[in-house]
Image: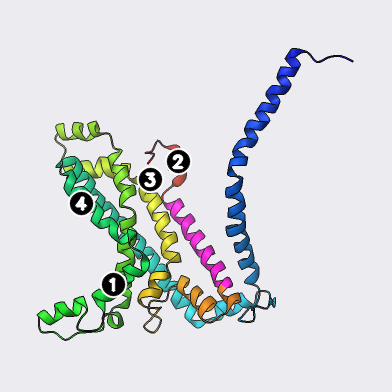
Amino acid sequence: MKQPTIAEIDRKEDRKARRRSKRFPFMLMSPFFVLTGLFVIVPILIMFVMSFTDMGLTLEWNFIGFKTYARLFADPALKTIILRTFIFVILGTICSVLSSIFITVITTFYLDTIYRKENAGIIFRIIWLLPSLTPSVVYAFIWNYVFGPTDYHLMNIVRSWFGLEPITWFALYPQQILFLAVVITSASSSIILFSAAVRQIPLHIIQAARVDGASPLYICRKIVLPYLRWPITQKTLWSVLIYFCTYEIIFLLTKGGPAGKTTTFAYYVYQNAFNLKKFGMGAALAVVLVAMSALLGLLVLRVFKVNEQLQDPRMDI
């Protein structure tokens, strides 16, 4: 029997080492895959199957096919809720992205870079971060205190200074108050992303532009904003998904009222699944919600031409 040569043994050992090196990353990631499968993939599959049932409080799996979806789209209130949700998502995303850019340009570019007042910029950013760091219950409590209906709530105290009677703010302006509360939180959470992006701009480029006589506004428009293209894309996509799924602040502030004026699609899912105990209908609504979020997310990626951005050099933050 022919004995293997040293070269053959070395080649075998090399192949074994390469196989081990290829398996090692998957071994490290295996807990992630297991946990994701158990707590994300499996629940999604269960929800999808549940959407074809009329499961209620008794938790019986009575399969009725697409009748749940037929009932869903026959609901006369659904069109209004979908329209309200899309308006909420689109306007909220636009306002949060624009306000994030504005705050970042003022604090990080003008105060820190142009006027060298870094302490002022840092203090403002810390204050602006507070809404996103505050727990939802506490955040809602603050808004309830500001716009509550009695003489002891902040806005009615201000009205009393001018001799005006207290009003029920949440009854008169529920959509405006809710929109403002959500936009402030969303814009607050992105200040770190945008500030980090501005700080990655090479300082010598800005200095050279100033030496050439460029104004701060011109530098902002021609240098800063192009550098923010990738963070703006990330923030827009994230905002679309977050606004579609927003329900807890609605629950804490208005509970979808008055008269359903602040009921969005996500909160409608919650109402059917947990208030009315229509788990089959809630699952079907959740499937539709995921589909709408995915379609709008793909539209955002198409509008911002993400494929081109991935090919171009960009800032890593």
Mark 4 near mark 1, Cβ–Cβ under 8 Å? Answer: no
Q: Label 4 is placed on what type of residue?
A: Ile
Q: Earlier in the sequence, mark 4 or mark 1?
A: 4
Mark 3 packing: few (<14 Cα in 10 Å), some, or many (20+)? many
Measured as percent of width and height from the top left, residue 229 is found at 35, 45
Q: Which residue is mark 2?
A: 310
Cα separation, mark 2 vs mark 1, equals 41 Å
Q: Quadrant of residue 174?
A: bottom left
Q: Quadrant of residue 169?
A: bottom left
Q: Earlier in the sequence, mark 2 or mark 3?
A: 3
Left or right of 317? Residue 156 is left
Q: Earlier in the sequence, mark 3 or mark 4?
A: 4
Q: Which residue is mark 1?
A: 143
Q: Which residue is mark 3?
A: 230
Q: Which residue is mark 4?
A: 123
Instruction: Give the camera-side residue of 125 and 302.
Output: 125
Left or right of 12? Residue 153 is left
SS at mark 1 in the image: helix
Labelled disc at residue 126: none
Mark 1 packing: few (<14 Cα in 10 Å), some, or many (20+)? some
Residue at the image point whose x is 38% and y is 76% from the top: 262
Cα separation, mark 1 vs mark 3, equals 33 Å
Mark 2 near mark 1, Cβ–Cβ under 8 Å? Answer: no
Above or below residue 211? Residue 38 is: below
Above or below residue 94? Residue 264 is: below
Q: Label 3 is placed on what type of residue?
A: Trp
Image quarter hosting the C terminus: top left
